[in-house]
Amino acid sequence: MIPKSLGASSSASGVAGIRRLIARHKTLDWLFGLLGTLALLLATLVFAALFGQMLINGAPQLSWEFFTSFPSRRAASAGILSAWVGTILVMLVTAVVAVPLGIGAGIYLEEYARKNLLTDIIEINVTNLAGVPSIIYGLLALGLFVYQFGLGQSIAAAGLTLALLILPVVIVATREAIRTIPQNIREGAYACGSSKWQVVSHHIIPYSLPGIMTGVIIGLARAIGETAPIITIGALTFIAFLPPSPFSNAEQLISFEWLLAPFTVMPIQMFNWISRPEEAFQANAAAAGLVLLLMTLSMNALAIWIRYHFRKKIKW
Amino acid sequence: MKQPSRRSTAAAVAILGSVVLSPLAFAAPPVVKVDGSSTVFPITEAVAEEFQKARKGATNVTVGISGTGGGFKKFCRGETDIANASRPISRKEMDDCSKAGIRYYELPVAYDALTVMVNPQNNFIRSMTVAELKKIWEPGAQGRINSWKDVNPAWPDQKLKLYGAGADSGTFDYFTEAIVGKAKSSRGDFTASEDDNVLVQGIAGDKGALGYFGFAYYIENQKKLKAVAIDGGKGPVAPTPENVDNGSYQPLSRPIFIYVSEKSLDKPEVRDFVDFYMKNARPLVKEVKYIPLPAKAYSGNLDHLARRKIGTVFGGENETGLTIEELMKREAQL
């Protein structure tokens, strides 16, 4: 069917007009596709170039010794032992604090909280917190954790700071994940006589877990590269010893002394090496960057795997 | 029924006791805390590295970088044992320390030569006078001195691009004081960075560039940069360790220090570290490309510690153009 307006003059030119219109739309379509591909290529190329350069500069430095040596003034014997141990311990504290708090807050806001002014204010604040520059968290933590709570410049203070930093991310991810669960599931469970907690623990948490875990890991992947708040609370540049081991002696199984130990983390070690006069340290910085990037990538890979693995188990 | 419960109570008490007492029974090695200037960092880091190797983990040392000012803030709050400083303690910092009851030893550990650099392709500059540098860097030069020709009519009309230390650094304080005559007084339209490698890259890639930073960065990048001899009134003098040693590289030679808290020095590990520092400083300072003091300066420092000579010989002022000889005479008066 040819619309009247087009076919008014003659049906032949009308068909040609439509063909032209279609051709033009197809060209636009194709152009947009090209634009999108170019944008994607540009983004990927920038990353690939950065990664490639880091790989070329850093890969020769990667050796067993690089992971098991302390920092040194000699580039050849300098390693990242205290940095990667520090990063992992800080991340551990961050995860232990931020995950239960964030998931709890998310569930409360979605399932329990009544819609009123207070909840609205909390919601707006949580969303805004996600956009606060990380240095602000560092300043808050310096006053609160380091001085007020007397934690000093320790792993615990750093872990708590980064936990605050990623808390909004975890809360928002939890809420988004919970919202994807169809209302019928809740109603079905209530209809069978479940209490609210039973609905949450039997249905809401398991079904939203893939989404939540993804959010948690994206949050942690952000925290692992953070430098500003960690510098603010006083991470050290040269530290050639490890925190006390959590499993130091047989009688007392787990010790928490390491929580209060001074520390350094990967981004700070990198930053220090980059600002050194000797060129050999630039290669070390590239290698440390490579390790940090691999840490982040493997966390993201874990997030993808968890999402895939848990989703398979959900049978609605 | 009673027996096991009593036993388990006893066990619980024992576990609790061991948890509470564990810091005493299984104490981690003592830690010496150092923080402050990034200029002094390489020296203290080298000493700390060797010290930990020598003590085989019996004492741990941490070294932070928060700038000379930041280092003194922590030091005067009693959070650190030692402050790294690329300038003498200021009047305000002296007040802060005395309010908190922190008394300190002032120990010069090395000399640095602030080096003025141009691009290697610059073929008309070999030396510059302090007056010429002042003409370039004083606040009034902004907008007026834009080309090399504006400084000296004998030089070509090439655009002048300036690179310098960030305003928070001790290097900036010292350079402005020595060249312009007043600390922190500088023109603002120059590329400022706390990261000296940024300045190296800038000067190396810009034909009309002029910049300044510490000697160590120049030595490591000699191929990309050309150092300018400085004429402080007695003819041009190149920035070399010899010229700093004999006191002729003026006014851009500067002493750098560590400040040790009197209270901390009572701790055996801090005392041990400072002793080690003074006894091993000469080769290590040289290795990290600073200019060591004569051996008697380090033994003089140890003497000050032994005779409990606390305080500063600078009275809160940042003095420029002090030769090693003059500094040692001054310190001896303490």
Image (cartoon, helix red, strand yellow):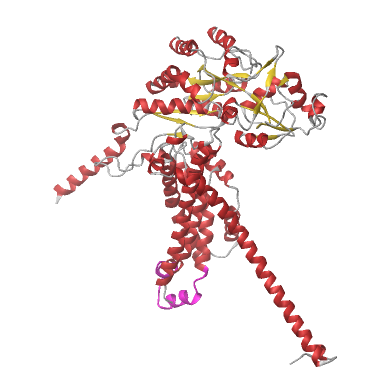
Left or right, B53 with respect to A38, comes to left
- Position of residue A155 relative to residue B41, above or below, is below
Q: Main secondary structure of the magenta part?
A: helix
Left or right, B138 with respect to A64, comes to right
Q: Is residue A187 magenta?
A: yes
Quadrant in the picture for residue B99 = top right
Left or right, B91 with respect to B209, comes to left
Residue closest to the eye, B90 or B223: B223
Q: Position of residue A191 (x, y in %)?
A: 43, 78
Q: Position of residue A15 (x, y in %)?
A: 77, 88
For image coordinates 42% across by 39% down, the residue present is A82
Q: Is residue B257 magenta?
A: no
| Furthest residue in direction right, as rendered | A9
What are the residue bounds of the magenta stretch?
A: A179-204
On the question of residue B101 being in view, the answer is: no
In the rendered image, the quadrant that contains the C terminus of chain A is bottom left
On the question of residue B280 being in view, the answer is: yes
For image coordinates 75% across by 30% down, the residue present is B187
Quadrant in the picture for residue B319 = top right
Q: Position of residue B60 (x, y in %)?
A: 39, 30
Left or right, B4 with respect to A252, comes to left
Q: How many marks?
A: 0
Q: Position of residue B234 (x, y in %)?
A: 70, 11
In the rendered image, the quadrant that contains the N terminus of chain A is bottom right
